[in-house]
Image (tube, helix red, strand yellow):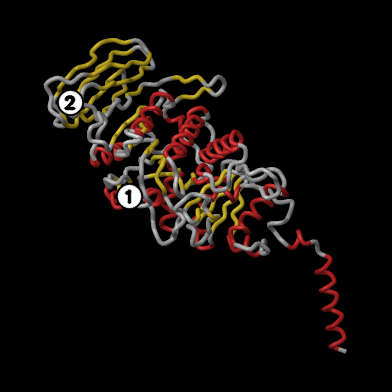
Amino acid sequence: MWSKNYRICFHVILFIFLLVPKNLKSQLKDPDNKADYIIIYSNQFIETLQPFIQWRGDQDLLVMPIGIDQIYTEFPDSSTKPQSIREFISFALQFWQDPKPQYVLLVGDTEYIPSYRMESSIENEDSIAIDELYTINLYESDTKSDVALGRLPVSNTDQLANIIKKTMLFEEGFISDNWMNNFIFLADSNDNPKYPGCFENSVKNFINNNLTEYFYPVRIDINEVSPFYGTRQDLFNALNSGALFFSYYGHGDPIVWSRYHYFTINDIDSLVESNKFFILSAAACSQNFDNPNQVTIVEKLLFFPNGGAVSTIASSGINSLGTGEVFLRYFYDQVFENHQQSIGKTILKVKQFINQISKDLPLDHQYRRFTLLGDPCLKIPFHLFINIEMEDHKFDYQFSLHQNYPNPFNRSTIISYQLKKDSFVLLKIYDLKGKLIYVLVNQWQDAGKYKLKFIPNNISSGVYLYQITADNFQLTRKFIYIK
């Protein structure tokens, strides 16, 4: 009797199981799912992620954290783990309800969450890891990206906690100051006679044609004969003084920039912990973040506590200066024009535009290699130093003193400032001991923008301070004079 009842129960359970639709057996394949922001994490990071998930959720984003093992379990038919991840993201884009995913964040280095690796078509490169391929919808025939994606390439919870803290401080504006108007450019020295001065020219062209007037360039060239030559210490001083953007145009590998070893992974330890975070972009050098056995420059800058980078944009493999120069030009044009747009959507729009004008780029194309390490939802806090009137996008300047340009300099430099109302203005230059060297302005001035050319006379090379006092506003900056 017992065995008969057992058989009846078994067949009833089996019959019910077979009647249940497959998409109801799988949480991720439930078509009623919806999310603005998918966070794919390795299981050991979920506790550290909780404040970040809550923070983004409080911004009216529907956040769905998903363990990587759940994806492998519910999308098991793929030949590889990366293919399972891509199939899941494609399924969510295609079949979930609105809001469909706008952002995807991978939390973990490639030991925990692999990148999408494929054979490379470039000579001397066997294969290439391209996270962007996760965002190409398998249910559509084109090869354009459909969602903004970023990665936090962490291997432990301390690294993750540092990045989360910096991201929240940066976006919430707890670290605002006039240093955020600075844009640091580092140009490599190129000895190839076919392309003399190519990196310096790339920086020059960007400053002249693309850099908005709301930012002031701090230009440092590695070439000793350049009028903008600066030492390694000059670069460290500039980074420690603070800048919103730091862009490198030059050769490099994951741990060394320039054949002169101008900036190495060990140099990051000498940076000051100052809560001054920058967004790093690299035009030509390779930053192979996908090697879990090696920490790269871009990763260590992300992990650096209370300083360094809040996000980085660099190629995951071989990349030419021409490709990098064009990509960064498009990227920063978008950044300067769309102040409320997240960094992930900025990159997504650039890649979609390039793909459109180039008619479906190859999957391993150099543009696709540019990878965002950081939160794709990150918004740059332009409101801290630019008052944006959202209706007409005009800009109302406040009191401000900008970084001189060029800096360092050896002949002359331009000092710029803004006054929001008529004021009595004092603009003075001091040495580092506080001795007054020059009085450049000592008069009433109308509200507006001002630029003046400073030509040193009878002073020695070194670091000097310039200070503005207007109404109740006072600010001091540094410049470097080289005879």
Q: Amino acid at mark 2?
A: Tyr
Q: Amino acid at mark 1?
A: Val
Find residue 338 and report its horizontal and vertical position in percent. Answer: 53, 29
Task: Kindly state the secondary structure of the residue where label 1 is placed.
Answer: strand
Dot 1 alpha-carbon crowd within 10 angstroms: few under 14, some 14 to 19, many 20 or more: many
Dot 2 alpha-carbon crowd within 10 angstroms: few under 14, some 14 to 19, many 20 or more: some
Find residue 456 and report its horizontal and vertical position in percent. Answer: 18, 21
Image quadrant where one finds the C terminus: top left
Q: Residue at x 53, y 53 (%)?
A: 106
Q: Residue furthest front?
A: 194
* Along the viewing direction, whichever of 232 and 162 lies nearer the viewer: 232
Residue 178: image quadrant is: top left
- Report the residue marked by disc 2: 430
Location of residue 305 with respect to 440 vertically, above or below: below
Find residue 376 and report its horizontal and vertical position in percent. Answer: 52, 44
- Report the residue marked by disc 1: 256
